[in-house]
Amino acid sequence: MKYRRFGRIGWQVSEVGYGMWGMAGWKDSDDAESARALQRAVDLGCNFFDTAWAYGDGQSERMLGDLVRANPSRRIYTATKVPPKNLRWPSRREFALDDCFPPEHIEKYVESSLKNAGLERFDLMQLHVWEDRWLDDDRWYRTLDRLRRRGWFQAIGISVNRWESWNGVKAVRSGWVDAVQVIYNIFDQSAEDELFPACREHDVAVIARVPFDEGSLIGNLTLESRWPEGDWRNTYFVPENLKATVEHVERLKAAIPPTMTLPETALRFILSHPAVSTVIPGMRKPRHVEMNIAASDAGPLPRALLEELRRHRWDRTPTEWSQ
Ligand SMILES: NC(=O)c1ccc[n+]([C@@H]2O[C@H](COP(=O)([O-])OP(=O)(O)OC[C@H]3O[C@@H](n4cnc5c(N)ncnc54)[C@H](OP(=O)(O)O)[C@@H]3O)[C@@H](O)[C@H]2O)c1
């Protein structure tokens, strides 16, 4: 495992971090297997774990707390997120700060996350949706800064809405956020346009999320793919999205060298960008952990392949199902 500096905060975080949504929010999870996968990741050098209150109403935070307690000699960086008060993902332009992050709501949920995890502090506290417009009202920042001084976390971050990487550039430039979490993968390359240059200029850490486009960049989706009833993926891969996605993935497969797999290529594409501090694949199986951590050891992709993959950029606009 290789490590990278986490922006101006300066932590040395593993290039491959860990996304903890699926194990507490998707329907086909096996808690014992997820716990084994988490421990395998720690054993292989993964030290950055991303959770949120919203992942199973605290269940994923509890699993992270257990992992930290089971590994007292390891430095494990913990990141969680405050949910928006209206529980709507993503935020929309018309939502006011008071709809999503009024001061008392932020404080209540930071406290609740600490209790869920059974930890005295987190390393990174993120807002789970974001509107750059909220920079006009500094109450969210003053609240987080006050809680930070209390020792409840060290760094402040935002999580940018799907397919809206532009809607975080001003926050990065404001100097108030230490880290930004954004979707970045072979299809969604838009963060390269404005967000990454701003992060590099202001030394803000980048957490690249959803590296496999919620699973499509694994390469096994078909037009018949369905998930257990109540699983979020049924509402994302609606017929319209499933069809377009399968077509894009099939075209992409032709560009993957025979010596590489699509998931490995997907992760190494992300890690080839120097603005990225860590990539956080969702993983619930130890063998996925092993495969993904090996992508860090394999290093950046050759330039010619990177150029070919850039041609698979797929810009999409948020819709009612894109969440
Ligand atoms: N708004 C936000 O802030 C927000 C939104 C979405 C996600 N996130 C964060 O980003 C993380 C990652 O996104 P995600 O989990 O939604 O999607 P993702 O990482 O794009 O895809 C996860 C899927 O890929 C599978 N997978 C992982 N490695 C694999 C491998 N080597 N081979 C085959 N399959 C593999 C996983 O299977 P298994 O689970 O069965 O191992 C899971 O089904 C989340 O867990 C969460 O921490 C944040």
Image (cartoon, rainbow, N blue to C red):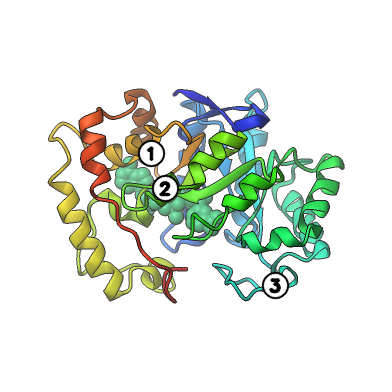
Residue 184 tag number? 2
**Dot 2 lies on which element?**
loop
Between circles 2 and 3, the one closer to the viewer is: 3
Q: Residues within 10 Å of mark 3 (few under 14, many from 20)?
A: some
Residue 96 tag number? 3
Residue that appears at 34% across and 67% down: 227
**Dot 1 lies on which element?**
helix
Residue 270 tag number? 1
User: Foreground residue, 313 or 210?
Assistant: 313
Q: Amino acid at mark 3?
A: Ala
The location of residue 195, given as percent across then percent down, is: 51, 46
Question: Does any portion of residue 194 appear in the rendered image?
Answer: yes
Residues at badges 1 and 2 in contact (C-beta under 8 Å)?
A: yes
User: Along the horizontal axis of the image, is 100 left or right of 225?
Assistant: right
User: Foreground residue, 32 or 51?
Assistant: 51
Q: Examine the image and state in which quarter residue 223 appears.
A: bottom left
Q: Amino acid at mark 1?
A: Ile
User: Foreground residue, 55 or 186?
Assistant: 186
The location of residue 316, given as percent across then percent down, is: 36, 64
Residue that appears at 46% across and 23% down: 2
**Mark 3 and mark 1: span between their CA atoms?**
33 Å
Residue that appears at 57% across and 53% down: 168
